Image: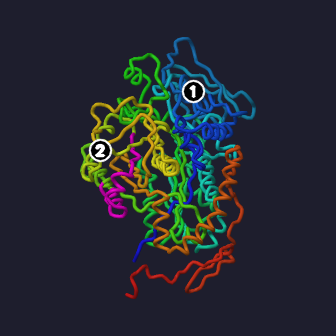
Amino acid sequence: MPSHLPVIVSFGGYNAAGRGSGHIAYQRMIYESLGAGAQAHTVKALASLMGLGGSDEAAVLAGTLIRKIEKTHFDPDATPIGLNFTLLNTAGKVQFELGARQLPDHIPHNWELHPLDEEGKRFRVEVSGSFDARTEVYTASLVKAAGQLPSGFDPGTYYRSTHHPRGLQMTVMAASDAIHNLGIAWQDVLAAINPDQIAVYSSSVMSQLDQPGFGGMMSSRAQGQRASSKQLSLGFTSMPGDFTNAYVLGSLGATGAVTGACATFLYNLRWAVEEIRCGRRKVAVVGCSEAPILPEVIDGFAAMSALATDADLCKLDGTKVPDYRRSSRPFGDNCGFTLGESSQYLVLMADDLAMELGADVLGAVPGVYVNADGFKKSISAPGAGNYVTMAMATGLARTLLGEDALRRHSFIQAHGSSTPQNRVTESKIFDSVAAAHGIEAWPVGAVKAYLGHSLGPASGDQMNATLGVFAHGVLPGIKTVIKPADDVHAGRLRISAKDAELDKPQIAFLNSKGFGGNNATATVFSPSVVKSYLARHHGQKAYDRWLKNRDTTLSSRARYLESADAGKLQAIYEFGTGMIDEERLQIDAESLGVPGYQHKIPTAIDEGFGKF
Protein backbone atom coordinates (compact mmCIF):
# COMPACT_ATOMS: atom_id res chain seq x y z
CA MET A 1 0.00 0.00 0.00
CA PRO A 2 1.60 3.34 -1.04
CA SER A 3 2.28 5.97 1.61
CA HIS A 4 0.66 9.37 1.74
CA LEU A 5 3.23 12.14 1.40
CA PRO A 6 3.22 14.56 4.38
CA VAL A 7 3.23 17.96 2.65
CA ILE A 8 4.12 21.21 4.43
CA VAL A 9 1.28 23.63 3.72
CA SER A 10 1.97 26.35 6.30
CA PHE A 11 4.32 27.45 9.04
CA GLY A 12 4.52 30.26 11.55
CA GLY A 13 6.16 31.33 14.75
CA TYR A 14 8.36 33.81 16.53
CA ASN A 15 12.01 33.77 17.54
CA ALA A 16 14.87 36.21 17.96
CA ALA A 17 14.83 36.98 14.23
CA GLY A 18 11.13 37.85 14.16
CA ARG A 19 7.96 36.38 12.67
CA GLY A 20 8.05 33.12 10.76
CA SER A 21 5.31 33.67 8.18
CA GLY A 22 6.33 35.58 5.09
CA HIS A 23 9.92 34.45 5.79
CA ILE A 24 10.53 37.60 7.86
CA ALA A 25 12.74 35.80 10.41
CA TYR A 26 14.68 34.10 7.62
CA GLN A 27 15.17 37.40 5.79
CA ARG A 28 16.54 38.96 8.98
CA MET A 29 19.19 36.21 9.05
CA ILE A 30 20.27 36.87 5.44
CA TYR A 31 19.72 40.63 5.70
CA GLU A 32 23.11 41.49 4.20
CA SER A 33 22.28 39.45 1.09
CA LEU A 34 18.89 41.05 0.43
CA GLY A 35 18.25 43.69 -2.17
CA ALA A 36 17.24 47.19 -1.10
CA GLY A 37 13.54 46.49 -1.56
CA ALA A 38 13.61 43.25 0.44
CA GLN A 39 15.62 44.93 3.20
CA ALA A 40 13.09 47.74 3.45
CA HIS A 41 10.24 45.22 3.61
CA THR A 42 11.99 43.23 6.35
CA VAL A 43 12.72 46.33 8.40
CA LYS A 44 9.15 47.59 8.06
CA ALA A 45 7.65 44.27 9.17
CA LEU A 46 10.00 43.95 12.14
CA ALA A 47 9.56 47.60 13.13
CA SER A 48 5.78 47.06 13.24
CA LEU A 49 6.25 43.94 15.37
CA MET A 50 8.56 45.83 17.72
CA GLY A 51 6.21 48.80 18.13
CA LEU A 52 8.60 51.27 16.52
CA GLY A 53 7.05 54.38 15.06
CA GLY A 54 8.77 54.17 11.69
CA SER A 55 11.12 51.98 9.72
CA ASP A 56 14.12 52.49 12.01
CA GLU A 57 16.72 50.17 10.50
CA ALA A 58 19.31 50.69 13.26
CA ALA A 59 16.80 49.94 16.03
CA VAL A 60 15.45 46.89 14.20
CA LEU A 61 18.87 45.39 13.62
CA ALA A 62 20.01 46.10 17.19
CA GLY A 63 16.80 44.74 18.71
CA THR A 64 16.80 41.34 16.99
CA LEU A 65 18.95 38.18 17.04
CA ILE A 66 21.27 37.35 19.97
CA ARG A 67 22.02 40.35 22.16
CA LYS A 68 22.43 41.34 25.78
CA ILE A 69 19.52 40.19 27.93
CA GLU A 70 16.95 42.96 28.23
CA LYS A 71 15.33 44.02 31.48
CA THR A 72 11.93 42.84 30.28
CA HIS A 73 13.29 39.39 31.20
CA PHE A 74 15.55 40.36 34.13
CA ASP A 75 18.44 42.71 34.75
CA PRO A 76 21.59 40.67 34.00
CA ASP A 77 23.72 43.26 35.82
CA ALA A 78 21.60 43.13 38.98
CA THR A 79 19.87 39.76 39.23
CA PRO A 80 18.05 39.03 42.52
CA ILE A 81 19.33 36.16 44.61
CA GLY A 82 18.61 35.05 48.16
CA LEU A 83 21.35 35.59 50.73
CA ASN A 84 21.35 33.32 53.78
CA PHE A 85 22.96 34.71 56.95
CA THR A 86 22.88 34.49 60.75
CA LEU A 87 21.82 37.43 62.90
CA LEU A 88 23.94 37.58 66.02
CA ASN A 89 21.71 39.12 68.67
CA THR A 90 24.12 40.80 71.10
CA ALA A 91 22.21 43.98 71.95
CA GLY A 92 18.81 42.96 73.23
CA LYS A 93 15.91 41.44 71.38
CA VAL A 94 15.31 41.81 67.66
CA GLN A 95 11.79 43.01 66.83
CA PHE A 96 9.62 42.83 63.72
CA GLU A 97 5.91 42.71 62.87
CA LEU A 98 3.87 39.96 61.20
CA GLY A 99 0.23 39.46 60.28
CA ALA A 100 -1.55 36.58 61.97
CA ARG A 101 -1.71 34.62 58.71
CA GLN A 102 2.06 34.95 58.34
CA LEU A 103 2.80 33.27 61.65
CA PRO A 104 4.11 29.69 61.46
CA ASP A 105 2.03 26.87 62.93
CA HIS A 106 4.91 26.02 65.23
CA ILE A 107 6.31 29.14 66.89
CA PRO A 108 10.12 28.93 67.37
CA HIS A 109 11.18 28.62 71.02
CA ASN A 110 13.01 31.96 71.03
CA TRP A 111 10.07 34.01 69.71
CA GLU A 112 7.77 36.07 71.91
CA LEU A 113 4.47 37.26 70.39
CA HIS A 114 2.79 40.54 71.43
CA PRO A 115 -0.63 41.38 69.90
CA LEU A 116 -0.81 44.83 68.30
CA ASP A 117 -4.62 44.95 68.02
CA GLU A 118 -7.63 43.56 69.86
CA GLU A 119 -8.63 41.33 66.93
CA GLY A 120 -5.27 39.56 66.97
CA LYS A 121 -4.64 40.30 63.31
CA ARG A 122 -1.11 41.64 63.80
CA PHE A 123 1.74 40.84 66.18
CA ARG A 124 5.08 42.21 67.26
CA VAL A 125 7.64 39.43 67.36
CA GLU A 126 10.61 39.65 69.74
CA VAL A 127 13.46 37.22 69.12
CA SER A 128 16.14 36.46 71.68
CA GLY A 129 19.45 34.89 70.76
CA SER A 130 20.90 34.39 67.28
CA PHE A 131 18.84 33.14 64.36
CA ASP A 132 19.16 32.36 60.66
CA ALA A 133 17.60 34.69 58.12
CA ARG A 134 17.40 35.31 54.41
CA THR A 135 17.17 38.49 52.37
CA GLU A 136 17.20 39.39 48.69
CA VAL A 137 20.37 40.91 47.25
CA TYR A 138 21.51 41.55 43.69
CA THR A 139 24.41 40.15 41.74
CA ALA A 140 25.60 40.12 38.14
CA SER A 141 24.71 37.09 36.04
CA LEU A 142 27.63 35.04 34.71
CA VAL A 143 25.78 34.89 31.38
CA LYS A 144 24.32 38.06 29.89
CA ALA A 145 23.50 37.12 26.27
CA ALA A 146 20.43 35.35 24.88
CA GLY A 147 18.38 34.98 21.72
CA GLN A 148 15.31 36.99 22.76
CA LEU A 149 12.14 37.83 20.88
CA PRO A 150 12.50 41.20 19.11
CA SER A 151 12.67 44.16 21.49
CA GLY A 152 9.26 45.63 22.23
CA PHE A 153 7.29 42.57 21.08
CA ASP A 154 5.13 41.32 23.94
CA PRO A 155 3.08 38.28 22.83
CA GLY A 156 0.73 38.55 25.81
CA THR A 157 -0.70 41.90 24.69
CA TYR A 158 -2.46 40.48 21.62
CA TYR A 159 -5.11 38.47 23.46
CA ARG A 160 -6.53 37.97 26.95
CA SER A 161 -3.46 36.31 28.44
CA THR A 162 -4.04 36.84 32.17
CA HIS A 163 -2.03 34.35 34.27
CA HIS A 164 -0.50 32.70 31.19
CA PRO A 165 3.21 31.82 31.32
CA ARG A 166 5.28 33.42 28.58
CA GLY A 167 5.78 30.12 26.76
CA LEU A 168 2.02 29.68 26.39
CA GLN A 169 1.56 33.27 25.24
CA MET A 170 4.12 32.49 22.54
CA THR A 171 2.22 29.29 21.72
CA VAL A 172 -1.01 31.14 21.01
CA MET A 173 0.73 33.68 18.80
CA ALA A 174 2.85 31.15 16.90
CA ALA A 175 0.04 28.68 16.27
CA SER A 176 -2.20 31.57 15.15
CA ASP A 177 0.48 32.71 12.72
CA ALA A 178 0.70 29.23 11.19
CA ILE A 179 -3.09 28.85 10.86
CA HIS A 180 -3.56 32.27 9.25
CA ASN A 181 -0.57 31.66 6.97
CA LEU A 182 -2.32 28.55 5.63
CA GLY A 183 -4.49 30.76 3.42
CA ILE A 184 -7.47 28.42 3.87
CA ALA A 185 -10.17 28.97 6.49
CA TRP A 186 -9.76 26.40 9.24
CA GLN A 187 -13.46 25.53 9.07
CA ASP A 188 -12.98 24.62 5.41
CA VAL A 189 -10.22 22.20 6.41
CA LEU A 190 -12.44 20.61 9.07
CA ALA A 191 -15.32 20.30 6.61
CA ALA A 192 -13.20 18.09 4.36
CA ILE A 193 -12.14 15.51 6.98
CA ASN A 194 -13.45 13.47 9.87
CA PRO A 195 -12.96 15.14 13.27
CA ASP A 196 -10.49 12.42 14.27
CA GLN A 197 -8.31 12.86 11.15
CA ILE A 198 -6.50 15.85 12.60
CA ALA A 199 -3.67 15.69 15.13
CA VAL A 200 -1.70 18.18 17.22
CA TYR A 201 1.75 17.21 18.45
CA SER A 202 3.29 19.97 20.52
CA SER A 203 5.25 20.37 23.75
CA SER A 204 7.99 22.16 25.66
CA VAL A 205 11.08 20.60 27.21
CA MET A 206 11.61 22.79 30.24
CA SER A 207 7.92 23.21 31.09
CA GLN A 208 6.74 26.73 31.89
CA LEU A 209 9.26 27.78 34.53
CA ASP A 210 8.37 31.45 35.00
CA GLN A 211 6.23 32.81 37.82
CA PRO A 212 2.78 31.90 36.37
CA GLY A 213 3.91 28.27 35.87
CA PHE A 214 6.06 25.72 37.66
CA GLY A 215 8.63 28.37 38.61
CA GLY A 216 6.18 30.24 40.79
CA MET A 217 4.70 27.09 42.26
CA MET A 218 8.05 25.54 43.20
CA SER A 219 9.41 28.73 44.78
CA SER A 220 6.23 29.92 46.52
CA ARG A 221 6.77 28.11 49.84
CA ALA A 222 10.40 29.19 50.15
CA GLN A 223 9.42 32.80 49.38
CA GLY A 224 6.58 32.84 51.88
CA GLN A 225 3.91 32.98 49.16
CA ARG A 226 0.96 30.82 48.23
CA ALA A 227 0.84 28.75 45.06
CA SER A 228 -2.00 29.73 42.73
CA SER A 229 -4.59 27.32 41.36
CA LYS A 230 -3.20 27.76 37.83
CA GLN A 231 0.54 27.34 38.27
CA LEU A 232 0.57 23.55 38.41
CA SER A 233 -1.64 22.91 35.39
CA LEU A 234 -0.12 25.63 33.20
CA GLY A 235 3.36 24.31 33.90
CA PHE A 236 2.92 20.92 32.21
CA THR A 237 5.15 20.13 29.22
CA SER A 238 1.99 19.20 27.29
CA MET A 239 0.43 22.65 27.65
CA PRO A 240 1.59 24.04 24.25
CA GLY A 241 -0.38 21.21 22.62
CA ASP A 242 -3.29 21.57 25.03
CA PHE A 243 -3.56 25.31 24.37
CA THR A 244 -3.40 24.74 20.61
CA ASN A 245 -6.23 22.21 20.79
CA ALA A 246 -8.47 24.02 23.25
CA TYR A 247 -8.08 27.69 22.31
CA VAL A 248 -6.67 27.93 18.78
CA LEU A 249 -8.09 24.99 16.80
CA GLY A 250 -10.90 23.60 18.92
CA SER A 251 -9.71 20.17 17.82
CA LEU A 252 -11.31 16.82 18.64
CA GLY A 253 -8.49 14.88 17.00
CA ALA A 254 -5.41 13.13 18.28
CA THR A 255 -3.01 14.94 20.56
CA GLY A 256 0.42 14.26 21.96
CA ALA A 257 3.38 15.97 23.59
CA VAL A 258 6.64 14.16 22.97
CA THR A 259 9.82 15.46 24.59
CA GLY A 260 13.38 14.52 23.70
CA ALA A 261 15.63 17.31 24.95
CA CYS A 262 16.93 19.42 22.05
CA ALA A 263 15.36 17.04 19.49
CA THR A 264 11.83 17.62 20.78
CA PHE A 265 10.46 19.38 17.67
CA LEU A 266 11.68 16.53 15.48
CA TYR A 267 10.20 13.95 17.86
CA ASN A 268 6.79 15.57 17.46
CA LEU A 269 7.32 15.94 13.71
CA ARG A 270 8.17 12.23 13.43
CA TRP A 271 4.88 11.27 15.08
CA ALA A 272 2.95 13.52 12.68
CA VAL A 273 4.80 12.19 9.62
CA GLU A 274 4.19 8.56 10.59
CA GLU A 275 0.47 9.19 11.19
CA ILE A 276 -0.03 10.92 7.85
CA ARG A 277 2.05 8.43 5.88
CA CYS A 278 -0.02 5.48 7.08
CA GLY A 279 -3.31 7.30 6.43
CA ARG A 280 -4.43 7.55 10.05
CA ARG A 281 -4.42 11.38 9.96
CA LYS A 282 -4.99 13.86 7.15
CA VAL A 283 -3.80 17.01 8.94
CA ALA A 284 -1.19 17.47 11.64
CA VAL A 285 -0.16 20.63 13.46
CA VAL A 286 3.33 20.29 14.93
CA GLY A 287 5.00 22.75 17.25
CA CYS A 288 7.10 23.57 20.28
CA SER A 289 7.32 26.58 22.55
CA GLU A 290 10.04 27.46 25.02
CA ALA A 291 10.69 30.55 27.16
CA PRO A 292 13.85 29.64 29.12
CA ILE A 293 15.46 33.05 29.55
CA LEU A 294 15.25 32.98 33.33
CA PRO A 295 18.02 33.40 35.93
CA GLU A 296 17.33 29.96 37.40
CA VAL A 297 17.55 28.17 34.03
CA ILE A 298 20.75 30.04 33.19
CA ASP A 299 22.15 29.04 36.59
CA GLY A 300 21.37 25.40 35.86
CA PHE A 301 23.07 25.28 32.47
CA ALA A 302 25.97 27.41 33.74
CA ALA A 303 26.53 24.90 36.55
CA MET A 304 27.03 22.28 33.82
CA SER A 305 29.61 24.57 32.15
CA ALA A 306 27.36 24.45 29.08
CA LEU A 307 26.83 28.18 28.47
CA ALA A 308 29.11 30.84 27.02
CA THR A 309 29.84 33.06 30.02
CA ASP A 310 31.04 36.65 29.76
CA ALA A 311 34.38 35.66 31.25
CA ASP A 312 34.91 32.82 28.77
CA LEU A 313 33.95 34.99 25.79
CA CYS A 314 36.44 37.65 26.86
CA LYS A 315 39.14 35.03 27.35
CA LEU A 316 38.41 33.55 23.93
CA ASP A 317 38.68 36.94 22.21
CA GLY A 318 41.38 38.48 24.42
CA THR A 319 39.11 41.39 25.32
CA LYS A 320 37.65 42.98 28.43
CA VAL A 321 34.17 43.44 26.98
CA PRO A 322 32.26 40.41 25.62
CA ASP A 323 30.84 40.48 22.10
CA TYR A 324 27.29 39.42 22.88
CA ARG A 325 26.23 39.36 19.23
CA ARG A 326 28.88 36.69 18.57
CA SER A 327 28.35 34.62 21.72
CA SER A 328 27.09 31.60 19.71
CA ARG A 329 29.77 30.30 17.34
CA PRO A 330 28.83 26.93 15.82
CA PHE A 331 31.85 25.01 14.47
CA GLY A 332 34.18 27.89 15.36
CA ASP A 333 36.43 28.51 18.35
CA ASN A 334 33.70 28.57 21.00
CA CYS A 335 33.12 28.11 24.70
CA GLY A 336 29.46 27.12 25.15
CA PHE A 337 25.97 27.67 23.83
CA THR A 338 23.61 30.62 24.20
CA LEU A 339 20.00 30.21 25.31
CA GLY A 340 17.18 31.42 23.09
CA GLU A 341 13.39 31.59 23.22
CA SER A 342 11.16 30.52 20.38
CA SER A 343 7.77 29.13 19.40
CA GLN A 344 7.48 27.42 16.01
CA TYR A 345 4.51 25.68 14.36
CA LEU A 346 4.12 23.66 11.16
CA VAL A 347 0.97 22.47 9.37
CA LEU A 348 1.23 19.17 7.47
CA MET A 349 -1.37 17.61 5.17
CA ALA A 350 -1.61 14.35 3.30
CA ASP A 351 -0.83 15.09 -0.34
CA ASP A 352 -4.30 14.09 -1.58
CA LEU A 353 -6.03 16.47 0.85
CA ALA A 354 -3.63 19.29 -0.05
CA MET A 355 -4.55 18.78 -3.71
CA GLU A 356 -8.26 18.71 -2.92
CA LEU A 357 -8.21 21.92 -0.86
CA GLY A 358 -5.83 23.85 -3.11
CA ALA A 359 -3.28 24.23 -0.31
CA ASP A 360 0.08 25.75 -1.14
CA VAL A 361 3.09 23.44 -1.10
CA LEU A 362 6.11 24.69 0.85
CA GLY A 363 7.91 21.35 1.04
CA ALA A 364 7.42 17.81 2.30
CA VAL A 365 8.81 15.55 5.02
CA PRO A 366 9.07 11.96 3.78
CA GLY A 367 10.87 10.74 6.90
CA VAL A 368 12.18 11.60 10.36
CA TYR A 369 14.59 9.25 12.12
CA VAL A 370 15.18 8.96 15.85
CA ASN A 371 17.84 6.82 17.54
CA ALA A 372 19.50 6.56 20.95
CA ASP A 373 23.23 6.14 21.61
CA GLY A 374 23.39 2.73 23.23
CA PHE A 375 25.34 2.24 26.46
CA LYS A 376 26.97 5.43 27.70
CA LYS A 377 29.41 6.39 30.41
CA SER A 378 27.92 9.87 30.67
CA ILE A 379 24.34 10.93 30.00
CA SER A 380 25.56 14.16 28.37
CA ALA A 381 28.22 12.56 26.16
CA PRO A 382 27.54 12.08 22.42
CA GLY A 383 27.31 8.61 20.92
CA ALA A 384 26.55 6.53 17.86
CA GLY A 385 22.85 7.33 17.52
CA ASN A 386 23.31 10.41 15.34
CA TYR A 387 25.32 8.39 12.83
CA VAL A 388 22.26 6.17 12.46
CA THR A 389 19.78 9.03 12.00
CA MET A 390 21.98 10.85 9.45
CA ALA A 391 22.65 7.64 7.52
CA MET A 392 18.94 6.81 7.40
CA ALA A 393 17.89 10.34 6.39
CA THR A 394 20.45 10.60 3.59
CA GLY A 395 19.72 7.04 2.49
CA LEU A 396 16.04 7.91 2.08
CA ALA A 397 16.88 10.97 -0.02
CA ARG A 398 19.23 8.96 -2.21
CA THR A 399 16.62 6.23 -2.73
CA LEU A 400 13.81 8.65 -3.62
CA LEU A 401 15.67 11.33 -5.60
CA GLY A 402 18.95 9.73 -6.66
CA GLU A 403 22.66 10.27 -6.06
CA ASP A 404 22.94 13.45 -8.12
CA ALA A 405 20.27 15.28 -6.10
CA LEU A 406 21.91 14.22 -2.84
CA ARG A 407 25.41 15.20 -3.94
CA ARG A 408 24.66 18.46 -5.74
CA HIS A 409 21.37 19.80 -4.37
CA SER A 410 21.26 19.03 -0.64
CA PHE A 411 22.32 20.94 2.44
CA ILE A 412 22.40 20.46 6.21
CA GLN A 413 20.82 22.48 8.99
CA ALA A 414 23.20 21.45 11.77
CA HIS A 415 22.42 21.18 15.45
CA GLY A 416 25.45 23.47 15.81
CA SER A 417 25.09 24.12 19.53
CA SER A 418 28.34 26.12 19.78
CA THR A 419 30.13 23.87 22.27
CA PRO A 420 33.68 22.54 21.77
CA GLN A 421 32.43 18.96 21.97
CA ASN A 422 29.61 19.46 19.45
CA ARG A 423 31.80 21.07 16.82
CA VAL A 424 34.02 17.98 16.74
CA THR A 425 31.46 15.18 17.04
CA GLU A 426 28.78 16.58 14.72
CA SER A 427 31.23 17.61 12.02
CA LYS A 428 32.77 14.12 12.13
CA ILE A 429 29.34 12.58 11.56
CA PHE A 430 28.67 14.87 8.60
CA ASP A 431 32.12 14.22 7.13
CA SER A 432 31.69 10.45 7.46
CA VAL A 433 28.26 10.45 5.81
CA ALA A 434 29.54 12.76 3.06
CA ALA A 435 32.37 10.32 2.33
CA ALA A 436 29.90 7.43 2.12
CA HIS A 437 27.90 9.25 -0.58
CA GLY A 438 30.79 10.89 -2.43
CA ILE A 439 29.85 14.41 -1.37
CA GLU A 440 32.82 16.79 -1.52
CA ALA A 441 31.51 20.21 -0.41
CA TRP A 442 28.32 19.76 1.61
CA PRO A 443 26.76 23.14 2.57
CA VAL A 444 26.22 23.39 6.34
CA GLY A 445 24.10 26.01 8.11
CA ALA A 446 23.62 26.57 11.83
CA VAL A 447 20.86 29.01 12.79
CA LYS A 448 21.82 28.98 16.48
CA ALA A 449 24.48 31.50 15.48
CA TYR A 450 21.60 33.98 15.07
CA LEU A 451 18.91 32.70 17.41
CA GLY A 452 20.65 30.89 20.23
CA HIS A 453 19.56 27.47 21.43
CA SER A 454 15.81 27.46 22.00
CA LEU A 455 15.88 23.87 23.33
CA GLY A 456 12.58 22.16 22.35
CA PRO A 457 11.78 24.36 19.29
CA ALA A 458 15.40 24.37 18.05
CA SER A 459 14.64 22.23 14.99
CA GLY A 460 11.53 24.33 14.42
CA ASP A 461 13.94 27.24 14.00
CA GLN A 462 15.86 25.07 11.53
CA MET A 463 12.65 24.31 9.62
CA ASN A 464 11.71 28.00 9.54
CA ALA A 465 15.07 28.81 7.92
CA THR A 466 14.95 25.79 5.60
CA LEU A 467 11.64 26.87 4.07
CA GLY A 468 13.27 30.24 3.48
CA VAL A 469 16.20 28.59 1.72
CA PHE A 470 13.80 26.67 -0.55
CA ALA A 471 11.99 29.92 -1.37
CA HIS A 472 15.02 32.15 -1.92
CA GLY A 473 17.98 29.85 -2.55
CA VAL A 474 20.28 31.39 0.07
CA LEU A 475 21.66 29.43 3.04
CA PRO A 476 22.38 31.74 6.01
CA GLY A 477 26.10 31.77 6.71
CA ILE A 478 27.56 31.17 10.16
CA LYS A 479 28.51 34.84 10.44
CA THR A 480 29.66 34.73 14.07
CA VAL A 481 32.58 32.50 13.05
CA ILE A 482 35.69 33.72 11.25
CA LYS A 483 36.69 30.20 10.21
CA PRO A 484 36.04 26.63 11.39
CA ALA A 485 38.01 25.61 14.46
CA ASP A 486 41.12 23.52 13.83
CA ASP A 487 39.54 20.38 15.29
CA VAL A 488 36.43 20.53 13.07
CA HIS A 489 36.19 17.78 10.45
CA ALA A 490 35.57 20.18 7.57
CA GLY A 491 37.30 18.39 4.69
CA ARG A 492 34.04 17.51 2.92
CA LEU A 493 31.92 20.28 4.42
CA ARG A 494 31.21 23.79 3.21
CA ILE A 495 31.05 25.86 6.38
CA SER A 496 30.91 29.50 5.38
CA ALA A 497 30.84 32.74 7.36
CA LYS A 498 28.94 34.31 4.46
CA ASP A 499 25.48 33.62 3.08
CA ALA A 500 25.75 30.97 0.38
CA GLU A 501 23.70 30.90 -2.83
CA LEU A 502 22.77 27.27 -3.43
CA ASP A 503 22.27 25.57 -6.79
CA LYS A 504 18.57 24.64 -6.90
CA PRO A 505 18.28 23.31 -3.33
CA GLN A 506 16.09 20.22 -3.29
CA ILE A 507 16.89 18.40 -0.04
CA ALA A 508 17.53 19.59 3.50
CA PHE A 509 18.61 17.53 6.48
CA LEU A 510 17.57 18.91 9.86
CA ASN A 511 19.86 17.44 12.49
CA SER A 512 19.58 17.43 16.27
CA LYS A 513 21.84 15.97 18.94
CA GLY A 514 19.89 16.13 22.19
CA PHE A 515 21.06 15.75 25.77
CA GLY A 516 20.76 12.16 26.99
CA GLY A 517 21.18 10.57 23.57
CA ASN A 518 18.07 12.01 21.89
CA ASN A 519 19.24 12.08 18.27
CA ALA A 520 16.99 12.95 15.34
CA THR A 521 17.36 13.83 11.66
CA ALA A 522 14.59 14.87 9.28
CA THR A 523 14.65 14.64 5.49
CA VAL A 524 12.84 17.62 3.94
CA PHE A 525 12.10 18.05 0.22
CA SER A 526 11.73 21.35 -1.61
CA PRO A 527 8.49 22.60 -3.24
CA SER A 528 9.88 21.90 -6.72
CA VAL A 529 10.47 18.25 -5.84
CA VAL A 530 7.01 17.93 -4.28
CA LYS A 531 5.22 19.55 -7.22
CA SER A 532 6.91 17.17 -9.63
CA TYR A 533 5.76 14.26 -7.46
CA LEU A 534 2.19 15.57 -7.29
CA ALA A 535 1.94 15.92 -11.07
CA ARG A 536 3.21 12.36 -11.64
CA HIS A 537 1.34 10.74 -8.77
CA HIS A 538 -2.06 12.40 -9.22
CA GLY A 539 -2.03 13.08 -12.97
CA GLN A 540 -1.82 16.30 -14.96
CA LYS A 541 -5.57 17.07 -14.83
CA ALA A 542 -5.66 16.90 -11.04
CA TYR A 543 -2.45 18.92 -10.87
CA ASP A 544 -3.82 21.68 -13.11
CA ARG A 545 -7.00 21.78 -11.04
CA TRP A 546 -4.89 22.11 -7.88
CA LEU A 547 -2.91 24.99 -9.39
CA LYS A 548 -6.13 26.82 -10.19
CA ASN A 549 -7.57 26.27 -6.70
CA ARG A 550 -4.28 27.33 -5.14
CA ASP A 551 -4.67 30.85 -6.52
CA THR A 552 -7.39 31.55 -3.95
CA THR A 553 -5.14 30.24 -1.18
CA LEU A 554 -2.25 32.44 -2.23
CA SER A 555 -4.48 35.53 -2.38
CA SER A 556 -5.83 34.85 1.10
CA ARG A 557 -2.33 34.33 2.47
CA ALA A 558 -1.12 37.55 0.87
CA ARG A 559 -3.85 39.51 2.65
CA TYR A 560 -2.84 38.03 5.99
CA LEU A 561 0.85 38.74 5.45
CA GLU A 562 0.12 42.33 4.49
CA SER A 563 -1.82 42.78 7.71
CA ALA A 564 0.86 41.05 9.81
CA ASP A 565 3.63 43.13 8.24
CA ALA A 566 1.71 46.21 9.38
CA GLY A 567 1.73 44.91 12.96
CA LYS A 568 -1.90 43.80 12.96
CA LEU A 569 -1.33 40.36 14.40
CA GLN A 570 -4.47 38.26 14.67
CA ALA A 571 -4.25 36.03 17.72
CA ILE A 572 -6.71 33.13 17.70
CA TYR A 573 -7.89 32.59 21.28
CA GLU A 574 -11.33 31.07 21.62
CA PHE A 575 -11.93 30.86 25.35
CA GLY A 576 -15.28 29.22 26.15
CA THR A 577 -16.72 29.76 22.66
CA GLY A 578 -17.95 27.14 20.21
CA MET A 579 -18.12 24.49 22.89
CA ILE A 580 -19.64 21.14 21.90
CA ASP A 581 -23.07 20.31 23.28
CA GLU A 582 -22.51 16.74 24.48
CA GLU A 583 -26.27 16.15 24.57
CA ARG A 584 -26.32 16.45 20.77
CA LEU A 585 -23.70 13.77 20.11
CA GLN A 586 -25.06 11.05 17.81
CA ILE A 587 -23.74 7.60 18.71
CA ASP A 588 -24.57 4.38 16.91
CA ALA A 589 -22.79 1.07 16.34
CA GLU A 590 -20.94 2.32 13.27
CA SER A 591 -20.08 5.95 13.94
CA LEU A 592 -20.06 8.98 16.20
CA GLY A 593 -21.57 12.23 14.99
CA VAL A 594 -20.44 15.53 16.50
CA PRO A 595 -22.51 18.73 16.20
CA GLY A 596 -20.80 21.30 14.01
CA TYR A 597 -18.83 18.71 12.02
CA GLN A 598 -19.90 17.61 8.55
CA HIS A 599 -18.37 14.14 8.73
CA LYS A 600 -18.86 11.47 11.37
CA ILE A 601 -16.12 9.56 13.15
CA PRO A 602 -16.24 5.90 12.02
CA THR A 603 -16.10 3.51 14.97
CA ALA A 604 -16.45 0.16 13.17
CA ILE A 605 -12.68 -0.34 13.02
CA ASP A 606 -10.44 -3.39 13.13
CA GLU A 607 -6.97 -1.73 13.20
CA GLY A 608 -5.93 -4.06 10.39
CA PHE A 609 -6.46 -7.28 12.34
CA GLY A 610 -9.61 -8.42 10.54
CA LYS A 611 -11.68 -11.06 12.34
CA PHE A 612 -10.14 -12.95 15.27
Q: Residue 315, percent across and down? A: 38, 20
Residue, far bottom: 611
Which type of secondary structure does the marked residue at label 2 adopt?
loop
Image quarter hosting the N terminus: bottom left
Q: Which residue is mark 1?
A: 75
User: Element type at marker 1?
Assistant: loop
Quarter of the image for residue 62 reads: top right
Q: Is residue 205 visible?
A: no
Residue 267 visible to the viewer: yes
Q: Are marks 1 and 2 in contact (CB under 8 Å)?
A: no
Q: Position of residue 483 (x, y in %)?
A: 36, 31
**Residue count near mark 2 (Cα–Cα under 10 Å), binned few <14, some 14–19, many ≥20:** many
Magenta segment boundaries in residue numbering: 391-416
Kindly report the secondary structure that dominates the magenta region of the rendered protein.
helix
Whole-percent x, y for residue 156 in the image = 66, 44
Q: Is residue 362 magenta?
A: no
Instruction: Kindly identify which residue carries mark 2.
Output: 382
Q: Is 318 drawn above or below residue 456 in the view shown?
A: above
User: Is residue 410 highlighted in magenta?
Assistant: yes
* Residue type marked 2: Pro
Of label 1 and label 2, which has the lower sequence position?
1
Residue at x 39% of width, y 36% of height: 496
- Left/right placement of residue 210 relative to residue 161 reads left
Q: Is residue 51 above or below residue 506?
A: above
